[in-house]
Image (cartoon, rainbow, N blue to C red):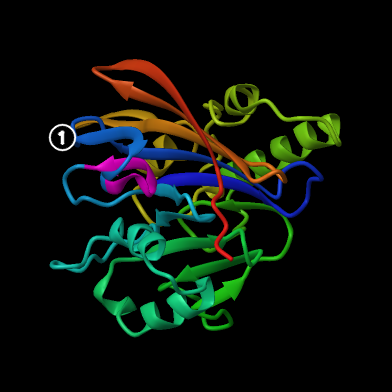
Amino acid sequence: MCIAAFLWQAHPLYPLVILLNRDEYHNRPTRPLEWWEGGEILGGRDEMAGGTWLACSRNGRVAFLTNVREIQKLPEAKSRGDLPVRFLQSKKMPIEFAEELEKEADHYNGFNLILVDLCSKTVCYVTNRAKEDNKFVTEVEPGIHVLTNAMLDSPWPKAQRLHNDFKELLDKCKKEELSMKEMVGKLMTNTIKDEDESMLPHIYPPKWEYQLSSILVDADTPIGRYGTRSTSALFVKATDEVDFYERHLENELWKEKTVSYRIEKTK
């Protein structure tokens, strides 16, 4: 499970801002934020399956995903974490990549995938658990969006809290520069849970959904501690400068890292 909020083409200084909490079992092996082999992909890495939840490339492409909350799982599903990596390694535009992915979407458990190409100013939302009135791929409109473990901008209470807090902070900043660490501290560390059971999605047992109903998750389970393993903030400036900040757990201690680079546009 994860939750992400992102701002697309709605701030004069930042065409793209992404904030993402990755929720996972604490004992799952993970690499922190770093440049991968070859120095073209930047992100954290799941060492068990080899994929990622959020990563970007030097040529202005970004991809991140969340799982869809569901009961039934495919016993031999492909790893969803491969999808952002495949997009970043591809030269296809977001819509082209999504259309190609649609042919094999039933090989994966439920996913929500955001594909960004900053050079063409295109963002697509892709899901293999679309409702009857939704498409497999949808172009994302400018504004604030929140992605939980349901459809993009689904009105789950935690999503609404994050959206409202994000908007309030942006209204205060207006046209000023944004502070990554301040936004992470104010928006992604909220531990408020849904006390009213009727507010829960009613997919998992209520006690477990209650634990997952906060923006920052921290829970003990019979198979180990589960919760927010890392918080990422990706800020893309109108000057093509990129700042990628990660706050992650390492041996149960929080550590921080920031990597900056400039987008390399191809002619």
**Which quadrant of the figure has residue 157?**
top right
Type of secondary structure dominating the magenta stretch: strand
Q: In front: 198, or 165?
A: 165
Name the secondary structure under disc 1.
Answer: loop
Task: Kindly identify the amino acid type of the residue bearing the numbered disc 1.
Answer: Ile
**Location of residue 73 with respect to 31 vertically, above or below:** below
Which residue is labeled 1 in the image? 223
Where residue 186 appears, as percent x and y from the top left, is 64, 24
* Magenta residues (range): 38-46
Residue at 82% across, 45% down: 12
Where residue 5 appears, as percent x and y from the top left, is 59, 45
Where residue 16 appears, as percent x and y from the top left, is 65, 48
Which quarter of the rendering shows the C terminus?
Answer: bottom right
Residue 205 visible (yes or no): yes
Residue 39 shown in magenta: yes
- How many neighbours does mark 1 have within 10 angstroms: few (below 14), some (14-19), or many (20 or more)? few
